[in-house]
Image: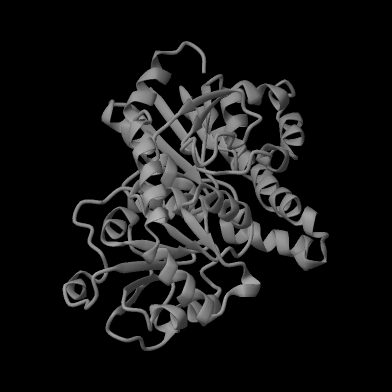
Amino acid sequence: MRVLITTWPAHGHLLPMLPLARAAQRAGHEVVVASGAEGVAEARRRGLPTWDVGPSRAEAGAAFRALVPDLGAIPPDQRIPTMISGMFGAAALRRAVELVPRAQEWKPDLVVHPVTELAGAIAAARTGARHVVHGLGPIPAEAWAWFGSRFGELCREWDVPELADGILETTYLDNCPPSLQPDAVADFRRRRPLRPSSGEVQPGERLPWDDALATLPYEHTVHLTLGTLFHGATHVFETALAGLRHLPVNVLVTVGPGTDPRRLGPQPPHVLVADFAPHALLLPRCAALVTQGGAGTIVAALCHGLPHLILPQGADQFRNAATAERVGVALVLPPSQVTPEAVGSVARRLLGDPSLTGAARAVQAEIETMPSADEVLAALVAEKTL
């Protein structure tokens, strides 16, 4: 069987789909990942065959900024829909132009894509392939109204108008723990649970600070990151570090793939900074996280039973933060409240309140009962229609 995985070109969108990709490879199926430049680079680093199709994340962002130079001028309740339509929707229209002909030539049997990358749905429809939509964790219930806003236009361009409504009958692989959010992208009516993971470890892969970890002085370690999209917010890193570095905890900081760790300046011996570290290796060493609240990061933390201090920066992070706080696995500081003193105070509570860790471990236990990628793939292969 040939499995085509298409994704928005971002680290946090590709990684949740890797377990299914690896399950397909273990089962002897042929797998290709199609994405823009950043997604292709990450997939190739992991040894997966790739197609570089459509705009890169940087190109999509530049095109959106040219169209909407001041997102702050948009009414607050329209900012997320405007950004999603202008970035993800527009990119899908461009990506399909390159993706569909490649898919028609390759003839996949199964196409897998997240709700953030809808060119994959067109590729499935035009090739007759079976089709599933892959979850990305705690995506807001109303997310289809955002991400699907230009899907009808895309379907008309490719002469598959019936898909505009029919996609909601497609199987949705829901990798969000139900207690965290039972209705991620609620419009999809055929849902199949899929156990999430915190990522994979490549052969020979190590943490960037392996030689220094043994010398760290404190019992507990906190991971600080702003993910792969908002890592340019140097002032947020600096403020968070100013609040954390005086606590009796080790701090492991990642400033974003390809970003120079030296931009944060000299740090004391118990604060280590690198550009990137795989969660699967890093999180078992941690007691808690301080992050921007990306959906994938929240779920990765819960795979290890770790609580969160969330400093939301944009996109869906404010909603993700509210969800995690409601479930009791996170504390939240909105931008207007982020000061060194507040970060330090809330981080003390994060590490000292056993109810937060207890709630995170309860979700971890729930995750461990969800069907594995191998089980889900076997069920998909056995079905005549998806």
Residue lying at 72% horizontally and 30% vertically, measured from the top left: 155
Left or right of 206, for residue 274:
right
Q: Residue at x 78, y 62 (%)?
A: 68
Whether residue 339 is situated above or below residue 164 in the rendered picture? below
Residue sitting nearer the eye, 135 or 342: 342
Percent of width and height locating residue 357: 37, 54
Q: Quadrant of residue 165?
A: top right
Q: Residue furthest bottom?
A: 266
Which is more toward the observer, 288 or 197? 288
Q: Which of 213 and 113 is in front in this view?
A: 213
The structure residue drawn at horizontal position 32% and vertical position 28%, both measured from the top left corner, is: 374
Q: In this view, does 232 lie to the left or right of 42?
A: right
Colour scheme of the picture: one colour
**Residue at (37%, 62%) from the top-left corner?**
288
Q: Where is residue 361 in the image (x, y as percent from the top left)?
A: 35, 47
Nearest the viewer among 12 and 9 is: 12
The quadrant of the rendering that contains the N terminus is top left
Residue farthest toward the top in the current orientation of the protein: 384
Which image quadrant for residue 274?
A: bottom left
Q: Can residue 109 be seen in this view?
A: yes
Q: Position of residue 26 (x, y in %)?
A: 27, 30
